[in-house]
Image (tube, rainbow, N blue to C red):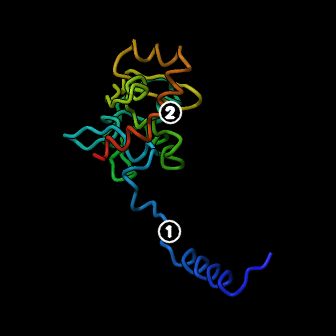
Amino acid sequence: MTWGRNGFLAAAIVLFWLSTAPLASAAQPNPLSPDPRFHVITDPGTGLALFGYDAVAYHIDQAAKPGLAAHEARFDDRLWRFASAANKAAFEADPLVYIPLFGGHDGVSVSNGNLTKGDPANFLLIGGRVALFRTEKDRDLFAADPDIRRKARENWPRVVRQLAGH
């Protein structure tokens, strides 16, 4: 294979462009990213993520517990509350583990290509992640039907564009 002078020039331009291109920054999240942390349900009145529920309690206690103002942390421009200092510390150590699937939007709604905020008191632990649902019926459907779960995963990037107004 012969590159020739033009081939080396093209390779040099590509390498220069790659070395000077700005890197993605966690400080500037892409609103179209399917990453659920950028689309966590938040109380519009208080700004509390998950409407003030403790994201860690779902995993530790298998319960929906309201967080306390005494145990607050800021992550991804949202205020999160926790039922205990230990739960706050667990979240701060690895927040992405505790952010709900689909940012807390109802998985059945997402599977249908729609957005409906889940109720933090209506949850399911599935595959090591918490998922929130608008109703118990939706929770039970999501738990029982792998096709709904597959459709929700497939639809999430498109639904995120809808969420971001694109």
Determine which of the numbered discs, if any, sits on residue 123 in the image. Answer: none
Q: Mark 2, residues whose alpha carbon is within 10 Å: few (<14), some, or many (≥20)?
A: some
Labels in figure, total: 2
Near-viewer residue (144 or 119): 144
Among numbered discs 2 and 1, the one appearing first in the sequence: 1
**Residue 124, position as x, y percentages in the image:** 48, 22
Residue at 38% of width from left, 42% of height from top?
160
Q: Which residue is mark 1?
A: 23
Dot 2 lies on which element? helix
- Residue sticking out furthest to the bottom: 5
Q: Quadrant of the N terminus?
A: bottom right
Residue at 45% of width from left, 60% of height from top?
26
Calculate the distance from the C-alpha at mark 2 to the C-alpha at mark 1: 26 Å
**Residue 74, position as x, y percentages in the image:** 37, 51
Q: Is residue 71 in view?
A: no
**Residue 44, position as x, y percentages in the image:** 22, 40
In the rendered image, which quarter is residue 137 located in?
Answer: top left
Q: Is residue 121 left or right of residue 18?
A: left
Near-viewer residue (158 or 127): 158
Near-viewer residue (84 or 18): 18
Dot 1 lies on which element? loop
**Residue 104, position as x, y percentages in the image:** 39, 33
Residue at 69% of width from left, 87% of height from top?
5
Q: Which residue is mark 2?
A: 153
Residue at 53% of width from left, 32% of height from top?
129
Q: Is residue 115 in view?
A: yes
Tell me if residue 15 comes above or below residue 64 in the rendering: below
Q: Is residue 12 left or right of residue 111?
A: right
